[in-house]
Image: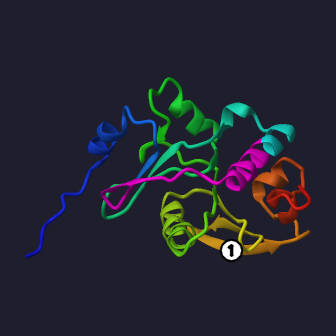
Amino acid sequence: MVVAVEKMGLAEFWAATENREALYELEAGELRQIPPESDLNQRIAIRLLAYFVQQGLPPALLRMKTEIVVSGARATVRVPDLVVLSPEADAALAGATRSTLTLDMPPPRLVVEVVSPGKENKNRDYRYKRSQYQSRAIDEYWIIDPTTQQVTLLTLLDGLYEETTLAGTQAIPSPLLTELATELTAAQLLGAGN
């Protein structure tokens, strides 16, 4: 006998997670609690946030743990480790009671995921989120992988992501970093020597 599991929509997701302290994503209509980040993953995300502020990116455009609704056959909400908003996305969130970028709002400029160990986490960050962020037309998606000591830069070009994998002293050729007139290497981001 097959038991049907009812899938959640966005309204049910928001109601179910409204008063919870834990973080959740909605993956193809199924509620999934996000486990606590490792100390290393948190340090990498905070290092990048601090770097952006030092380089002159307005703090109002930076978010951690902002929900992003992505398109798909079933309702899906992702919670990246770090988000850089466009001024338009920032304006769309002004006064919101929940930090959620819905499909009718402009996408962020950049999303960053710091990969947690395990095959399921790698698949989620490298495969599923890649196609979801691409379909949401997010200009840049960075996958920071402490296990492999690599940064994968995905840059949107004609609706598809172009991939560049970097390690060590290779500079990250990010359009956002170019705009900020700065250079950041994979090793600096991953905290080599820290």
Quarter of the figure with the N terminus? bottom left
Q: Position of residue 158 (x, y in %)?
A: 60, 68
Q: Which residue is mark 1?
A: 163
Q: Which residues are magenta?
A: 26-49
Q: Position of residue 150 (x, y in %)?
A: 76, 71
Q: Is residue 171 magenta?
A: no
Q: Is residue 32 magenta?
A: yes
Q: Residues within 10 Å of mark 1 (few under 14, many from 20)?
A: few
- Nearer the observer, 175 or 3: 3
Q: Reply above or below: 1 against 21.
A: below
Q: Position of residue 129 (x, y in %)?
A: 51, 64
Residue lying furthest top in this view?
95
Q: Reply above or below: 168 against 26.
A: below
Q: Reply above or below: 41 against 89.
A: below
Q: Secondary structure at mark 1?
A: strand
Quarter of the figure with the C terminus? bottom right
Image quadrant in which you'd find residue 156: bottom right
Q: Position of residue 48 (x, y in %)?
A: 77, 49
Q: Residue at x 83, y 65 (%)?
A: 186
What amino acid type should be assigned to the residue bearing mark 1? Glu
Q: Residue at x 43, y 44 (%)?
A: 102
Residue lying furthest left in this view?
1
Q: Residue at x 54, y 58 (%)?
A: 137
- Looking at the image, residue 112 sits to the left or right of residue 176; the answer is left
Image quadrant in which you'd find residue 159: bottom right
